[in-house]
């Protein structure tokens, strides 16, 4: 089969891509595993971080890619029947921690059969036994393995996956390329809404507007939230408005700065400091520097830069939360304590659980969420990564795989 192999980790440039498309042996599933014939695999910022070395690869060469839509085409020998498959097990990963094999199965495993379309996400496996796994936080598992970082991922014609960790994909979700970005961009975005504690009808700020945010805004609109989007790209602002943003602009602006904004000048009436027209307040206040200037209940930052964090806090009301949806972040700068004071919370978002995956897929199904995708042919992975690096992709980039 053909697979993209990362041979060294280094910054990507037009002439310098450390990935090669190679012929490698067809992998064979072991006990508790299935093999997927890959249809499509989403391209994520994390793949870029892995290629460029911001996340150290477990081994080289390595096949990245962790938003895999594929068809089960082989099932490993003696797959434990008690694998749980369709739902997150009470003890996730039991099959990997020595549960005895109940039967020797070759056609079905954990309720999944050959020919079934499933997704493989960033969470390749979790141990099921550590204190995090036992408390519903398998995303923080001390022994977790991540797809395309610790094990070969989906930028290949076939991939091996633990049967307990693949996510069944109902056909009504759509074609494979539209489904792929749901498996990381969508699911981690959904987890960031949970981490931020979003409640229906709240006002939410989104910083950065790429693959994850364009799915998150659809969930927020479904929940009746007002959404402000802060992004540099005019193209991304247009997409944000089309998807229901009440306002889209730069990070140094506020909705109140713009005439015709859905946001009343001066902020939300009834909030301390929110009942005065913006022009009557000190400049620091208008820019969100004052104690009570926060115009958002919660802010989610998708930007891989720490410099936005003080601004994100300034946009957040007392008692509100800033959630950082980034697997890699450079330094967070020093900031004055009043930005955090009054019970604001600053949290990061790490990985996903299978529970997140199931909840999100159900939400996509019932709320009819759709990913906007830019499809690249299998041979064009370097171009897709570069386009992502240069923020030239509208929505989510997806590699169309499909074995020969
Ligand atoms: Zn990802
Ligand atoms: Zn664990």
Image (cartoon, grey):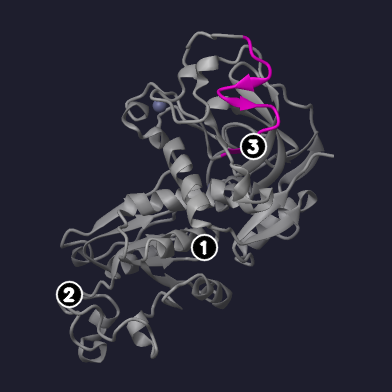
Q: Residue 137: which quarter of the image? A: top left
Which residue corresponds to mark 3?
153
In this rendering, is residue 307 above or below 347? below
Question: Which of the pair 141/110 is nearer the observer?
Answer: 110
Query: Does 220 sit above or below residue 381?
Result: below
The circle on residue 271 is 2
Q: Disc 2 or 1, which lies upstream in sequence?
A: 1
Residue 338 visible from this viewpoint:
yes
Q: Is mark 1 within 8 Å of ligand 1?
A: no
Stretch of the chain drawn in magenta = 104-120
Of circles 3 and 1, the one toward us is 1
Q: As rendered, which of 23 and 123 lies closer to the eye?
A: 123
Q: Specify whether 338 is left or right of 116.
A: left
Residue 102 part of the magenta-drawn span? no
Disc 2 + disc 1, Cβ < 8 Å: no
Residue underneath mark 1: 214
């Amino acid at each position: 089969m053909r697979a993209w192999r990362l041979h060294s980790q280094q910054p990507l440039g037009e002439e310098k891509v450390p990935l090669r498309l190679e012929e490698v042996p067809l992998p064979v599933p072991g006990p508790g595993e299935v093999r997927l014939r890959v249809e499509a695999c989403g391209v994520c910022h994390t793949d870029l971080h892995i290629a460029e070395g911001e996340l150290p690869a477990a081994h080289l060469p390595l096949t990245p890619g962790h938003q895999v839509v594929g068809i089960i085409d082989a099932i490993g020998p003696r797959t434990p029947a008690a694998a749980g498959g369709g739902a997150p097990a009470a003890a996730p990963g039991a099959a990997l921690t020595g549960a005895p094999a109940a039967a020797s199965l070759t056609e079905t495993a954990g309720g999944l059969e050959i020919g079934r379309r499933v997704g493989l996400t960033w969470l390749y496996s979790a141990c099921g036994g550590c204190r995090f796994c036992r408390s519903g936080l398998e995303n923080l598992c001390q022994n977790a393995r991540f797809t395309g970082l610790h094990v070969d991922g989906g930028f290949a014609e076939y991939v091996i996956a633990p049967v307990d960790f693949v996510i069944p994909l109902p056909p009504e979700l759509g074609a494979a390329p539209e489904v792929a970005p749901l498996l990381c961009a969508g699911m981690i975005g959904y987890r960031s809404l949970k981490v931020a504690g979003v409640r229906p009808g709240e006002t939410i700020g989104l910083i950065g507007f790429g693959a994850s945010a364009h799915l998150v805004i659809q969930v927020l609109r479904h929940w009746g939230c007002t959404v402000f989007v802060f992004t540099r790209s005019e193209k991304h602002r247009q997409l944000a408005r089309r998807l229901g943003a009440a306002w889209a602009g730069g990070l140094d602006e506020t909705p109140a700065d713009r005439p015709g904004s859905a946001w009343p000048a001066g902020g939300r009436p009834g909030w301390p400091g929110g009942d005065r027209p913006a022009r009557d307040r000190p400049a620091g206040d208008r820019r969100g520097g004052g104690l009570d200037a926060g115009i958002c209940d919660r802010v989610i930052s998708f930007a891989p830069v720490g410099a936005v964090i003080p601004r994100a806090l300034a946009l957040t009301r007392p008692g509100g939360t800033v959630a950082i949806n980034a697997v890699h972040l450079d330094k967070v700068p020093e900031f004055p304590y009043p930005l955090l004071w009054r019970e604001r919370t600053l949290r990061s978002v790490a990985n996903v659980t299978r529970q997140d995956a199931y909840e999100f897929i159900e939400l996509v199904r019932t709320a009819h969420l759709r990913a906007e995708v830019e499809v690249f042919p299998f041979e064009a992975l370097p171009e897709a990564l570069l386009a992502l690096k240069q923020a030239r992709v509208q929505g989510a980039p997806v590699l169309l795989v499909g074995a020969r």
